[in-house]
Image: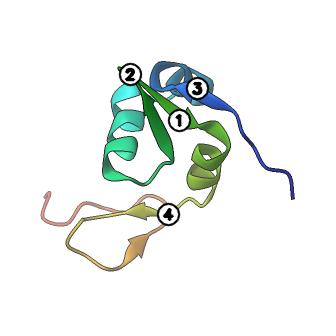
Amino acid sequence: MTKCRIWRQIKETAEIFKLPEYFVRQLVKSGKVIAIKSGRKIFVNVGKFAELLNTNMINADENQNELSFGIKPIKGFY
């Protein structure tokens, strides 16, 4: 198993995966992504970030214990 030790800033990580910086920052803030802070800069472990995205598990609601896969209709929207 190869360890990925590539660390990039939040902005660079967002550009690599073509995601909004806000999304990456929120994952770091929630602790779901491995990141380190050096001074004012935050570095994200790109390999672990890719693993998180590849698991394809998105928590639908913080209060729910079930995980959602894919696109689901929003309850109470209509």
> Residue at horizontal 57%, vertical 50%?
53
> Residue at horizontal 43%, vertical 60%?
58
Q: Sequence order check: which comes first, mark 4 or mark 3? A: 3
Real-space Cα distance between discs 4 and 3?
Answer: 23 Å
Which residue does the numbered mark 3 point to in the structure image?
8
73 horizontally vs 34: left or right: left
Q: Sequence order check: which comes first, mark 1 or mark 4? A: 1
Q: Which disc, if any, is residue 23?
A: none
Residue 16 location (% of width, % of height): 62, 25
Real-space Cα distance between discs 2 and 4?
Answer: 32 Å
Residue type for callout 4: Met
Which residue does the numbered mark 4 point to in the structure image?
57
Dots 1, 2 in contact, CB < 8 A: no
* Disc 3, SS: strand
Residue type for callout 3: Arg
Real-space Cα distance between discs 3 and 1?
Answer: 5 Å
Q: Residues within 10 Å of mark 4 (few under 14, many from 20)?
A: few
Dots 4, 3 in contact, CB < 8 A: no
Q: Sequence order check: which comes first, mark 2 or mark 3? A: 3
Location of residue 71 (image quadrant)? bottom left
Which tag is nearer the camera, tag 4 or tag 3? Answer: 3
Which residue does the numbered mark 1 point to in the structure image?
44
> Residue at horizontal 51%, vertical 48%?
34
Residue extending farthest to the front is 39
Residue 42 location (% of width, % of height): 43, 28
* Disc 1, SS: strand
User: In terms of depth relative to the viewer, which is nearer, 66 or 49?
Assistant: 49
* Disc 2, SS: loop
Residue type for callout 1: Val
Residue 30 location (% of width, % of height): 32, 51
Real-space Cα distance between discs 2 and 3?
Answer: 14 Å
Relative to residue 54, is residue 41 depicted above or below? above
